[in-house]
Amino acid sequence: MTHELTQQDRDLINLMQEDLPLTSHPFEQAARQLGIEEKDVVDRLLHLRDAGVLTRFGPFFDAEALGGAFCLCAIAVPEERFEEVLTKVNAFEEVAHNYQRDHKLNMWFVLATENQAGIEQTAKAIERDTGLKVLLFPKEQEFFIGFRVKA
Amino acid sequence: MKLDPKDRAIVEATQAGLPLVPNPFKVVADTLGMAEDDLIERFRQLKEQGIVRRIGAAPNHYRLGMTANGMTVWDVDDAVVDSLGEKVGSLPFVTHCYRRPRALPDWPYNLFAMVHGDSRDEVMAKREQVADLLGDAVKARDVLFSTRILKKTGMRLRRKES
């Protein structure tokens, strides 16, 4: 479902995908640009978050710069076992994102752990819990990360 | 990279997000028993070190009407994958682009480029632009559309035991 968004919502979402200033009142600048009160910015963001239009608000950490590790993983889950396997995989707090995709490899998730060893350990634990092979697709080279989606 | 205990406390306290209030840094600083200025300065340094990429909001693509999300995957000649990857990554509609290892025999693809669009047709049309750019260096290709978000959370550091 597409949430009904006003043009002002769209402008706000676009502004919020920029890096906010590190000041005591980080929404002041956006409020000025939109010609509304700071309080209205905050209220609108709360509404958009509660409506699921925004998934989160806050700092985006680079887990690798923190010494942590990320790895894209995939499993070919038999259709009839999908929900059961999903429950088991999502129970791991190391699973940060998980998507169903229309392919034989139909479950794609990202593991985020504090170190490289954590990736292999978690993948093995998921294989034990599900009885299914976890394919690991670690990033070898990153060409670009675009954060922004035009609202 | 070793984080000092104060920085680590900041990461733990904010990885799920900042409170949506006019002065979020003050609220977090109070929780951690720090001065707001100190917290802001530490965030500034974390950004300088590349540990914080930005502070802002993540939209739900689906709720914005971008209902089609195609992971385009390509088997690209190893000799040119990096130079072509740079070009694919700079296409305006590609949100992520990575070289990853192949998983032979089932998975011959070494270049992944995420393409978002309002429809599958739009994603397929954009995929052709990627194909044009890659040209003869491509030996095989596929596209995997997402059908459901199963989980989407930020990074989670485990709390230290002690």
Image (cartoon, rainbow, N blue to C red):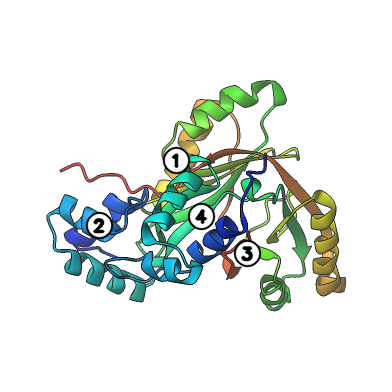
Q: Chain of mark 4?
A: B
Q: Chain of mark 1?
A: A
Circle 4: is it few (<14), some (14-19), or many (20+) Cα within 10 Å?
many
Image-based side of B124 in relation to B45, left or right: right
Residue with the mark numbered 4? B58
Circle 2: is it few (<14), some (14-19), or many (20+) Cα within 10 Å?
some
Circle 1: is it few (<14), some (14-19), or many (20+) Cα within 10 Å?
many
Would you place residue A111 above or below residue B91 in this image? above
Observer-nearest of B13 and B74: B13
Q: Earlier in the sequence, mark 2 or mark 3?
A: 2
Q: CA distance from mark 4 to mark 2?
A: 20 Å
Residue B57 point in image, percent of width and height: 47, 57
Is disc 3 in contact with disc 1, using a CB cutoff of under 8 Å?
A: no
Residue B12 point in image, percent of width and height: 28, 51
Residue B64 point in image, percent of width and height: 64, 50
Observer-nearest of B114 and B67: B67
Is disc 2 in contact with disc 3, using a CB cutoff of under 8 Å?
A: no
**What is the number of the mark on residue B10?**
2
The answer to whether any part of residue A107 appears in the image is yes
Q: Are marks 4 and 2 on the same chain?
A: yes
Give the image quarter of residue B24. Answer: bottom left
Q: Earlier in the sequence, mark 4 or mark 2?
A: 2
Q: Are marks 4 and 1 on the same chain?
A: no
Type of amino acid at the residue the image marks with label 4: Ala
Q: CA distance from mark 3 to mark 1?
A: 22 Å
**What is the number of the mark on residue B98?**
3
Residue with the mark numbered 1? A122
Image-based side of A122 in relation to B129, left or right: left
Observer-nearest of A16 and A30: A30
Quadrant position of the C terminus of chain B in the picture: top left
SS of the residue under disc 2: helix
Q: CA distance from mark 2 to mark 3?
A: 30 Å
